[in-house]
Amino acid sequence: MRTLYDFPPSGNCHKVRMMLSMLGLEYEKRTIDLLKGEQNTPAFLELNPRHKVPVLVDDGVIISDSAAILVYLVRKYGGKDWYPDDAEAMAEIQKWLSFSVNEVFNGLALSRAMVIFNRPMDADAVHKIADIALAVLESRLKESDWLALDRPTIADIACYPYAAAIGEGNISLAAYPAIRAWLARVEDLPGCVAMAPYQPAH
Amino acid sequence: MRTLYDFPPSGNCHKVRMMLSMLGLEYEKRTIDLLKGEQNTPAFLELNPRHKVPVLVDDGVIISDSAAILVYLVRKYGGKDWYPDDAEAMAEIQKWLSFSVNEVFNGLALSRAMVIFNRPMDADAVHKIADIALAVLESRLKESDWLALDRPTIADIACYPYAAAIGEGNISLAAYPAIRAWLARVEDLPGCVAMAPYQPAH
């Protein structure tokens, strides 16, 4: 029994949907509608006091936080190719997991949230972080096909959805050919589920 | 040869200083003065295109990002007590590493940065995240002495500095006895270096 507490437009939830699909794992979804505040109910806060999706419940084990769920899934079901064991490789991947929580979320995800959810924000500050996020990604992806270790790892999964959806934040990837090529490579991975366009009526 | 690119008031740098001390590892420091913009020089961006300290160079291996450096140090020099090997335990720790990058930084660190560095910010938004960060920490620490796994791990190191320094953000821990007791427990760990008060003239 495996249940994903999910919000369809969420890129953080999408990371988990992608990984579950790529590992061939069955699950059911329970929608937590963030626009209706369902992440603030006492029942949901029992699962995650951080008021956030995704949460995965896997045979009674509760795991919250998208990066943590990726670590859990690949270490439990996917082997060490996705997240290896030696200090240097783990640190390299952790750097991108932190980057996904920091610049990718605070820059790319919030640029999109301002547009699709009309969330009031300091647009200049958010776009400045988005510029750094895109510059860092482009610079790395000019040198390598993948973010860490020259092969697909959870670093790529963690950074993919909000980069793929940045057009919905009215930011063009025209000047970022290496990012565009990487998005296509991620989408070609076996079992990958591409980030879907935002649909307001869900 | 081990060099830490360091900014003395930075809590993210302090995590690395703590861990190096707790593992008994010698190193030298090179100050990157963020207030003078030294994180934006071409030479520094070669080390870390994210414009951020800390960066650790360990026998030629360059590791940036405080959480990544913690993972590297404990896996290379500290054994698996600090960051174990099984899926569930790793996910539990990763959750707190993400929390340290997200709520702890965006709430606790920025509350302090607004005060000590006079950084212009949306104070209400930052304080709202700080409230969630403190509530989540207090709730966990009422149940357990440590953030993850009922023993000290890099989860505690990653969350300690900006919680310890939150008084400098003019936020009181009077209502958070479990956090205060945990800060004291962290500071009692062998080799721990407590977060020092901010000193403007560094």
Image (tube, coloured by chain):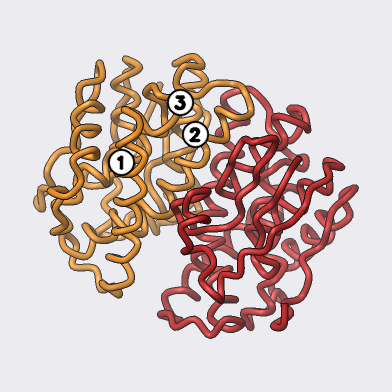
Chain colours: A red, B orange
Mark 1 near mark 2, Cβ–Cβ under 8 Å?
Answer: no
Do dots 1 and 3 share one subunit?
yes
Q: Which image quadrant is residue B132 in?
A: bottom left
- Is label 1 or label 2 in front? 2
How far from the left and from the top, in percent, is residue B17? Answer: 30, 31
Quarter holding the N terminus of chain B? Answer: top left
Q: Chain letter of disc 2? A: B
CA separation, marks 1 and 2? 25 Å
Q: Which image quadrant is residue A130 in?
A: bottom right
CA separation, marks 2 and 3? 8 Å
User: Which SS class for mark 2?
Assistant: helix
Query: Compared to B135, does A164 lie above or below?
Result: below
Q: Would you call the spot at circle 2 few (<14 residues within 10 Å), some (14-19), or many (20 or more)? A: many
Q: Amino acid at mark 3?
A: Leu
Query: Compared to B196, does B28 lie above or below?
Result: above
How far from the left and from the top, in percent, is residue A73? Answer: 71, 37
Q: Which residue is mark 1?
A: B6
Identify the residue shown where x is 53% and y is 85%.
Answer: A118
Q: Which residue is mark 2?
A: B93
